[in-house]
Image: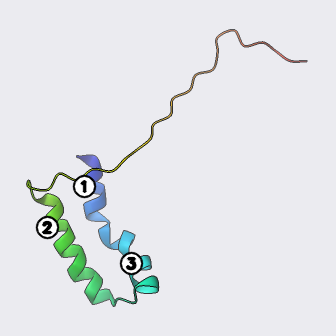
Amino acid sequence: MYTGLAVGQDIEGFLTYLWTMVMGWTQEEIQVYSAHLRRDMRSPNVHAYYPTRIVVGRKPLNAPTTS
């Protein structure tokens, strides 16, 4: 839920560089696309996901000391 909120509120920030510099879109085109994307993200019919990796590490309790 948090990720959807964070992405939805800053979708224009994510898209601006790529779409203007690489794709050649104008700022108005990006705003329209962002509005459509936000609407689709709020739709209960869309179940989007993306892969993530979580790494957990712990320091050993009795770690050998090196001199």
Q: Please report the residue visible at 32 percent of the width from the left and 66 percent of the height from the top.
A: 10
Q: Residue furthest top?
A: 62
Q: Secondary structure at mark 2?
A: helix
Closer to the chain start, of discs 2 and 3, is 3
**What's the mark number on residue 16?**
3
**Number of marks drawn:** 3
- What is the x, y in percent for residue 55? 50, 34
Circle 3 Cα neighbour tier, 10 Å, few/some/many (<14 / 14–19 / ≥20):
some
Q: Secondary structure at mark 1?
A: helix
* Distance in Å between CA atoms under marks 1 and 3: 18 Å
Q: Would you identify the image quadrant in which residue 32 lies?
A: bottom left
Q: Please report the residue visible at 27 percent of the width from the left and 88 percent of the height from the top.
A: 28
Q: Would you identify the image quadrant in which residue 33 lies?
A: bottom left
Q: Is residue 49 above or below residue 41?
A: above
Residue under circle 2?
A: 39
Q: Nearer the viewer, residue 12 or 37?
A: 37
Q: Give the residue type that dot 1 points to.
A: Leu
Residue under circle 1?
A: 5
Closer to the chain start, of discs 1 and 2, is 1
Q: Would you identify the image quadrant in which residue 12 lies?
A: bottom left
Quadrant containing the C terminus is: top right
Q: Secondary structure at mark 3?
A: helix
Q: Is residue 50 left or right of residue 21?
A: left
Q: Is residue 14 above or below residue 52?
A: below
Q: Give the residue type that dot 2 points to.
A: Arg
Q: Nearer the viewer, residue 4 or 25?
A: 25
- What is the x, y in percent for residue 66? 86, 18
Closer to the chain start, of discs 1 and 3, is 1
Circle 1 Cα neighbour tier, 10 Å, few/some/many (<14 / 14–19 / ≥20):
few
Q: Give the residue type that dot 3 points to.
A: Thr
